[in-house]
Image (cartoon, rainbow, N blue to C red):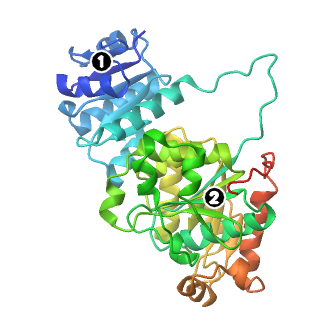
Amino acid sequence: MTQIVVVAADATFGQRVRAALSRPDGDGVLLWEKPLAGAADVQALADRAPAAVILGPKLGKEAAFSLAAYFDRTFPAIGVLVVAVPGPETWQRALDTGVRGIISPVATDDELRSNLNRVLQHARGRPAPAAVAAPEAPRARVITVFSPKGGSGKTILSTNLAVGLAARAPGSVVLLDLDLQFGNIGYALGLTPQHTISDAVSVLDDLDATTLKVLLSRHRSGLYALCAPNEPAAGDAIPTTAVTAVIKLFASQFGYVVIDTAAGLGEHTLAALDLSTDVIVLSDMDVPSVRDLRKALDALDVLGLRAPTRHFVLNRSDSRVGLTRAGITAAAGTTVDVEIPSSRDVPVSLNEGRPLLSDNPRSPVARHLAELVERIANGNGHGAPAGRGGGS
């Protein structure tokens, strides 16, 4: 069975696709060398019943997106990926033409593998449950905090969310910093970590639950944290596969996994979203932030990342900038779930490394953050996870 058809790409790229899918013998990957000049040519390709088609760089961006739109209209079951330089215009074209993913011409092997696995998983869909099955253990809640723009308050929100959940389930909450270049959860929590995610990656082949726990920093609230590397260059060296392995291991040991992310839709963030049960999307009270959020949510839909429960948090919601809640809802395409007001308490708490929910719980911001904690803890459509202690 042909899984992937690669169009308008050289043999080297075809070999990279085969290697990414662990198909060195070529099984399941077809390098299409015929032209796609009309409907009959596309039909001949579609007759191979591939799960996905990669439109390579030799086509050119305009031709690739035109073909993608045709596939979307005529063969919607076939996922299409386009090889192009990512950017706002490229993503907008992807949204308009039903493309399932953008592959950079200089993508790493990990990034290529991640894109391919994502589109294949979407093509397969979710398997139907067996008629008779043993009851499963409660699934961990994996909660990713995401915003397309920097400076939106992700770190304040993720650290306070983790602190609030730890108050309910001590020892069952772990916080992961996926802002791998400039992450600050250690600073926000007043921690001086002895180990970071770089240490986990360095022993990845031997990483198990016991080893991972040794690398965690414990906060006085009862939560555990795995902090970002101390140097930005170290973050660049962390592969997406390692991030996936760490998150899965956390999910097997903790009831709640809270993930802080870098701005935008990088591969590490997409890997986290792919494993998440919940995603908290965060925006400021301004038109560019809300529009960027709408584009990001549309991009997640295109990539097939629709499964997580989404919670829309509007930060600095009391800013008087001529926008209404109704206007924000319309522009973002989703309703506001929690509003966080502006307050000088926020930068003070960050500067002092003292989360508001533990050190200033009566502040207006803390009360609204507590609403988010309540929303997550109460399930909002999920079964609440059983507490699973993460440390001794």
Work out which quarter of the rendered image holds the N terminus and state it: top left
Q: Amino acid at mark 2?
A: Val
Instruction: Name the residue: 60% across, 85% down.
Output: 349
Helix or strand or loop: what does disc 2 sit on?
A: strand
Q: Count all numbered tags in the image, as a single digit.
A: 2
Query: In the displayed structure, would residue 260 be above or below residue 270?
Result: below
Instruction: Name the residue: 41% across, 52% down.
Output: 266
**First in sequence: mark 1 or mark 2?**
1
Q: Amino acid at mark 1?
A: Pro
Instruction: Name the residue: 40% across, 31% down.
Output: 116
Whether residue 268 is visible here, answered yes or no, is yes
Q: Residues within 10 Å of mark 1 (few under 14, many from 20)?
A: few
Residue at image mark 1: 24
Left or right: 359 with respect to 106?
right
Helix or strand or loop: what does disc 1 sit on?
A: loop
Residue at image mark 2: 174
Work out which quarter of the rendered image holds the C terminus and state it: bottom right
Left or right: 330 with respect to 87?
right
